[in-house]
Image (cartoon, grey):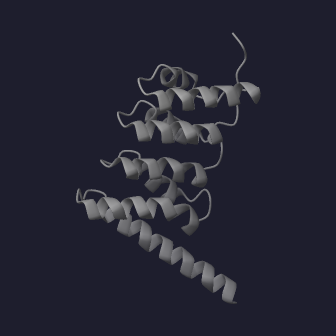
């Protein structure tokens, strides 16, 4: 009887945290941004994988005004969403074009663990990152391309 009660309490707690996160979405203060970052980072530990509300919250974090929150959102998405989810891959592919280097890097790292086959790997986004002005982004894109090639996701031209 304790296990179901704990599950209910955990679910209620998670819903409360998600509600608090949503209320602070428009707040531009540093404290609110730090709260959004912290909550987004722990979301995967609060809910079960595939939780639609948590996935939506992590996806919203990709559009946050603070790069730390966006990076936390990209990382949380990979942990929360099922591998190969096209909507999440599209959101992450959009992240590789972001002006923030940290967001581009986080999006690339997440894509590497998330795109399960060639159909899901956003090749155009990967090519864009191989030409990026930042050496770290280019390196991460090259690493992802090499891993995709080794895994049979890409063929030699």
Q: Quadrant for residue 80, please give it.
A: bottom right
In the rendered image, the vertical position of residue 117 relative to residue 22, given as above or below? above
Q: Nearer the viewer, residue 5 or 116?
A: 116
Quarter that holds the N terminus: bottom right
Q: Nearer the viewer, residue 27 or 8?
A: 27
* Residue 92 image position (x, y, % from top left): 50, 38
Q: Nearer the viewer, residue 6 or 105?
A: 105
Q: Residue furthest top?
A: 157
- Asked whether, in this view, residue 103 is left or right of residue 142, the answer is left
* Residue 79 image position (x, y, % from top left): 60, 53
Name the residue located 43 percent from the left edge and 73 percent from the top edge.
Answer: 16
- Asked whether, in this view, residue 157 is left or right of residue 102, the answer is right
Q: Is residue 118 visible?
A: no
Q: Residue furthest front?
A: 135
Q: Is residue 137 visible?
A: yes
In the rendered image, the vertical position of residue 17 relative to residue 77, given as above or below? below
Quarter that holds the C terminus: top right
* Residue 76 image position (x, y, % from top left): 53, 53
Name the residue located 24 percent from the left edge and 59 percent from the top edge.
Answer: 27
């Amino acid at each position: 009887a304790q296990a179901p009660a704990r599950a209910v309490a955990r679910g209620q707690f998670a819903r409360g945290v998600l509600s608090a996160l949503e209320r602070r979405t428009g707040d531009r203060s540093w404290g609110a941004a730090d709260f959004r970052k912290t909550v987004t980072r722990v979301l995967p530990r609060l809910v079960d994988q595939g939780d639609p509300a948590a996935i939506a919250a992590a996806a919203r974090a990709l559009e946050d005004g603070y790069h730390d929150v966006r990076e936390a959102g990209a990382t949380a998405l990979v942990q929360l969403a099922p591998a190969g989810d096209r909507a999440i891959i599209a959101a992450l592919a959009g992240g590789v074009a972001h002006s923030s280097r940290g967001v581009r890097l986080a999006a690339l790292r997440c894509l590497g663990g998330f795109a399960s086959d060639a159909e899901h790997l956003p090749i155009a986004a990967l090519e864009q990152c191989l030409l990026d002005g930042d050496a770290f982004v280019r390196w991460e894109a090259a690493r992802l391309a090499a891993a995709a090639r080794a895994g049979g996701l890409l063929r030699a031209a």
